[in-house]
Amino acid sequence: MQNTITQYGAPGFAGMLDGIGTKNVRSYAAEEALPMGFPVKLGTNAEKQVLKATAGAGVIGFTIHDQARNQNVDGAVQYLATETASILTQGRIWVKTSDTVVAGATANLTVADGSLTDAPVASGIEAFTQINVKFITGTTGAGLAIVEAK
């Protein structure tokens, strides 16, 4: 929910596509509520459904913010269960980061909240195995960055 107005908007938001480069977007049914820019894995019916990723091993892509999405009580935009979700499997997208990241670094999944980090794989941080994900922009702390999935 928007409570304030500023002169300049944010440069991006989670789930926003970056640029006009090559992209591969597929449609799946959301098996549960899915936040924007969130990593997803194949669901119960692997041909038709997706779920929030709880590990790096099964991630196939990221949810894309599109028109007329629903907001939860906290104002976060999401796909609701059973809605058609647009999933970016290749291309550039804005995502949340859990800490400072460096452009050019390999992205890993922070399992606790689905954010990305360039910290090495350790307890609670897992590598992506189905797709390769690199940071295109860096951050000075937790925030938003552009990643490229291949």
Image (cartoon, helix red, strand yellow):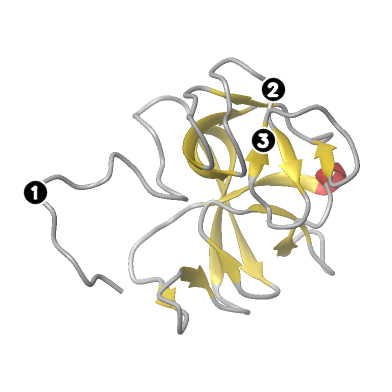
* Image spot of residue 105 (x, y percent): 64, 18
Location of residue 48 with respect to 135 vertically, above or below: below
Task: Name the secondary structure under disc 2.
Answer: loop
* Image spot of residue 69 (x, y percent): 40, 71
Q: Name the residue located 34 percent from the left edge and 71 percent from the top edge.
A: 68
Q: Name the residue located 14 percent from the left edge and 45 percent from the top edge.
A: 8
First in sequence, mark 2 or 3: give its number: 2
Location of residue 108 with respect to 6 vertically, above or below: above
Q: Badge 2: few (under 14), some or many (20 or more) residues near its Cα, within 10 Å?
A: many
Displayed quadrant of residue 81 = bottom right
Residue carrying label 2? 106
- Residues under labels 2 and 3: Cα distance? 8 Å
Displayed quadrant of residue 100 = top right
Residue carrying label 1? 7
Give the amino acid type for the residue marked by disc 1 in the picture.
Gln
Residue carrying label 3? 117
Give the amino acid type for the residue marked by disc 2 in the picture.
Thr
Disc 2, disc 3: CB below 8 Å? no
Q: Badge 3: few (under 14), some or many (20 or more) residues near its Cα, within 10 Å?
A: many
> Which part of the image, by quadrant, shows the C terminus?
top right
Disc 3, disc 1: CB below 8 Å? no
Name of the residue lying farthest toward the left = 7
First in sequence, mark 1 or 2: give its number: 1
Q: Name the residue located 60 percent from the left edge and 38 percent from the top edge.
A: 99
Q: Nearer the viewer, mark 2 or mark 3?
A: 3
* Image spot of residue 3 (x, y percent): 22, 72
Total numbered badges shown on the rendered structure:
3
